[in-house]
Amino acid sequence: MHLLLRRDQRSTMLGNVSFILEVRADITQEERAHISKYKLGSSLLYTKSELVDRGSGLLGLASRLAFKAMNISVSVDDLAGGKRIECKDILEMLAVEGQIREAAITFKQVLDAAAHFGGEEVIEI
């Protein structure tokens, strides 16, 4: 598995800068088979949520849309298919990137373990 990261930025209508992180994993056929066999596709690798007062009426609708936009989650399927994450500042983007890197490394360890069931592994110490 290879983790592919792409950073970008764009200007918003208000003249602010929005930072974009695109993440995707290049997954081998064998790894895809393990993901399917062990039903790992919906497993969350990263999640971030912020609390927002949802309210009611039009204000409630707007706050629910804002709530959805501020919540970020990345599953195994998202990583395999690619996911675009918008961040409000570069520090948030770097933090998200670091946590996704860590989660991808851990997930690679899960895939490696899945490849060794039913056999034995010799580890030299």
Image (cartoon, rainbow, N blue to C red):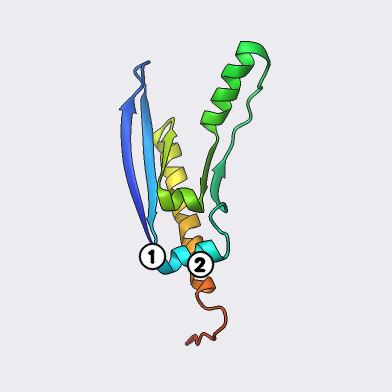
Horizontal and vertical percent for residue 16? 36, 21
Would residue 99 be visible to someone looking at this image?
A: no
Foreground residue among 102 and 66: 66
Residue in the picture at 44% in, 30% down: 88
- Reading the image, the residue beneath label 2 is 34
Kind of residue sitting beneath label 1 = Thr
Q: Alpha carbon of mark 2 to alpha carbon of mark 1: how far?
A: 10 Å
Q: Is residue 57 left or right of residue 66?
A: right
Determine the secondary structure under disc 2.
helix
Image spot of residue 124 (x, y percent): 47, 87
Residue 19 vertical position relative to residue 4 in the rendered view, above or below:
above
SS at badge 1: loop
**Which image quarter: residue 1?**
bottom left
Report which residue position mark 1 lands on: 28
Within 10 Å of the Cα at label 2, are there few (<14), some (14-19), or many (20+) other Cα atoms?
A: some
Judge from the rendering whether residue 84 lies leftward or rightward of residue 115; answer left or right: left
N-terminal-most mark, 2 or 1: 1
